[in-house]
Image (cartoon, rainbow, N blue to C red):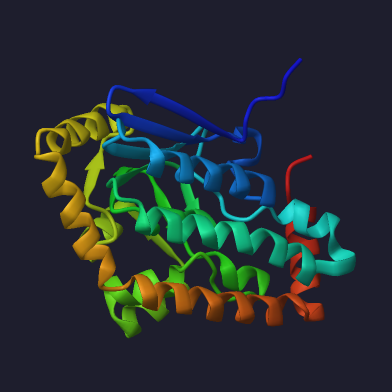
Amino acid sequence: MSREPSVRFEQSGAVVTLTLNRPDRLNALDSEMAGVLLDAIKAIEKNSSARVVVLRGAGRSFCAGGDVAAMHAHRDDLPTFIENTIDPFHACILGLQRLSKPVVACVHGAVAGGGFSLAMACDFVVATRSTRFVAAYPKLGAPADGGLSFFLVQRLGSARGLETLTTAGQRSAEQALQLGLVNRLADDDCLQPTADQWVAEMLALPEQSLRELKGLVTAQSAQALEAHLHREKAAFLRCAATPDFAARVAAFVQKLPA
């Protein structure tokens, strides 16, 4: 029996939908999923029939962040394991930003850690009213990755951005909307119709106009984002090398349901 792909790729007309597909792990990110997602992003860029991309998650949540259980399984050399995950993950973040097609993050449930980063790397975010945006990193004794410390400061300013990364580690969907982290809210049973309506609005725009506008907007920060991702990686690896990080990973895994 073949295993389900960790990222599903579906195209309907001009719309490509990418679905994070590890629902039993709340779509936690590992190196394999990051690699599959990166391949999908590269394929979309070459796909002349694709005009809009939707990124969503299967199951109860969009994405609960990095796979902490996998980190613990590689506790003998955490920095190397994390580096092997961060590299393709950061390539995904850059790929989403540089993609010539607009990307809509369609999120629900937990949007935590690297999942928060993924959502912020998209051009637009539509969320259910019960969605929770959680920075999560300090619980592991880590900084951010996936450009989250870049995107939050870019959108909120340094004070609000740092607050969201630290003491105000969880934001409701309504708070996220008010802060400008989310574009639109949907009732919990209307997420897909709301996203579909928005996608239809974009498809009604001239293709060349939409493409050029995305390029102009993302060009303003693309180089700065790439440099910042290198800083985030270095900071994360410094934290991953500490005994405190390993202890927090172990404690987190012990609390996971069997």
Is residue 249 visible from the viewing direction of this image? yes
Q: Is residue 73 left or right of residue 38?
A: right
Is residue 112 visible from the viewing direction of this image? no
Whole-percent x, y for residue 227 in the image: 47, 79
Whole-percent x, y for residue 201 in the image: 13, 35
* Res. 232 image quadrant: bottom right
Q: Is residue 55 above or below residue 253?
A: above
Q: Is residue 125 left or right of residue 61?
A: left
| Residue displayed at 71% across by 24% down | 3
Q: Residue furthest right?
A: 76
| Residue displayed at 34% across by 39% down | 53
* Res. 221 image quadrant: bottom left
* Res. 137 image quadrant: bottom right
49, 203: nearer the viewer: 49
**Looking at the rendering, in which quadrant would you find the C terminus?**
top right
Q: Is residue 178 above or below residue 57?
A: below
Q: Is residue 26 left or right of residue 79?
A: left
Whole-percent x, y for residue 194 in the image: 23, 32
Whole-percent x, y for residue 206 in the image: 9, 40
